[in-house]
Every structure is written in C-alpha cells, then in structure tokens.
Image (cartoon, rainbow, N blue to C red):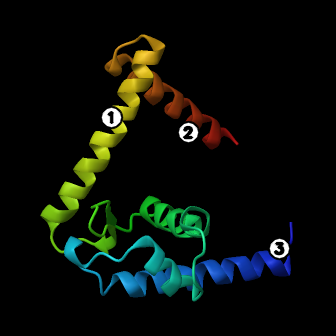
Amino acid sequence: MKKSNQDNKDEFDAGVYRHKLLAELSGRICEVNAISMTALFEVVYERPWYDRVNDTRDIRKLTAKMRKEGIPICSTSARNGGGYYLAAAGSELTNFLRKREIKALSILMGNAKIKKISLPNYMGQIKLEMEGQSDEAREV
C-alpha cells in the first residue's frame, strides 16, 4: 500500500518533533533542571498551549513512544515545578524507574484484587497471554 503525502508529512513532522524534544532535553540534565510539560510543548511545537490537558497530549504521547524505544526520558511531578529531564547519573535513572515499577505493580495488584486472584497468579496469566500473542505474531 502506497503512503499518501499526508502520511509522509506526518512522519517527517514526527521526526522533527522528536529531534526538537531531544535537543531541548539534552540541556535538561538532572531533575532540578526539569522543563514543564507546557514549556516543552511550546519549544517542540513552536506555538503556545491553550488547554493544559488537551494541547499537551502530543508531548505525553511523544515521550511515551520514545521511552518504549529505550530513550531514558525521566519525569517528575513535584508540586513546585515538575517536568521532563534526562538523568544525570545511573542512580537518578534507577530511582525514576523504581517509581514507575511501583506504580505498575500497584495497578496490577488492584487488577488482581478485582479478579480475586493473587498477584503472582495474575502476572503468570499476563505472561502466558503475552507469550501467546508473540507466538501468533511469529506465525503470521
């Protein structure tokens, strides 16, 4: 299937936005230098935001995508100025990842309680489902 001009433009724009985001974060090393989501939006998209939730959704999507690719973009939700940054040292990244693990486990624990099964059993089910999906993908 041939890509449309709009698809090519969207891919180009995504690459430009990705580059701008990384360029800005390269100057934001360490949590104390974090840039707010709204300020990062204005840098990356070169326009002001009007609605904090809706306008900044693309920044959250872009950072999530880049994290899935292995780029260690950290974030903080401190009341006095949270935002995005790159870790200064291994311990800072380790602490950020530990917070994410705790959050993920908390969500899984809640799901297990709703299903009325233990967390290890629930995680085993998830593992089996994921292995089944990857087996199906290989067969295609």
Residue under pointer 3: 3
Residue under pointer 2: 134
How many labels were placed on the picture?
3
Residue 12 vs residue 17: left or right? right
Inspect the image, locate mark 1, and give the three-letter code of the amino acid beneath it. Answer: Leu
Inspect the image, locate mark 3, and give the three-letter code of the amino acid beneath it. Answer: Lys
Q: Nearer the viewer, mark 3 or mark 2?
A: 3
Judging from the image, what secondary structure is the residue with disc 2 in?
helix
Query: Where residue 135 sits in the image (x, y, percent)?
Result: 57, 35
Query: Where residue 130 sits in the image (x, y, percent)?
Result: 51, 34
> Sequence-wise, which precedes: disc 3 or disc 1?
3
**Tag 2 near tag 1, CB within 8 Å:** no
Q: Mark yes or no: residue 30 visible.
A: no
Q: Local crowd at mark 3 within 10 Å, few (<14), some, or many (≥20)?
A: few
Q: Nearer the viewer, mark 3 or mark 1?
A: 1
**Tag 3 near tag 2, CB within 8 Å:** no
Instruction: Identify which residue is drawn at 48% across, 61% down.
Output: 64
Q: Local crowd at mark 1 within 10 Å, few (<14), some, or many (≥20)?
A: some
Query: Where residue 75 sits in the image (x, y, percent)?
Result: 33, 64
- From the image, which quarter does the C terminus lie in? top right
Judging from the image, what secondary structure is the residue with disc 1 in?
helix
Residue under pointer 1: 105
- From the image, which quarter does the N terminus lie in? bottom right
Instruction: Identify which residue is drawn at 23% across, 49% down.
Output: 98
Inspect the image, locate mark 2, and give the three-letter code of the amino acid beneath it. Answer: Ser
Instruction: Identify which residue is drawn at 44% across, 71% down.
Output: 37
Residue in the foreground of this view, choosing between 58 and 22: 58
Q: CA distance from mark 2 to mark 1?
A: 22 Å
Q: Mark yes or no: residue 126 visible.
A: yes
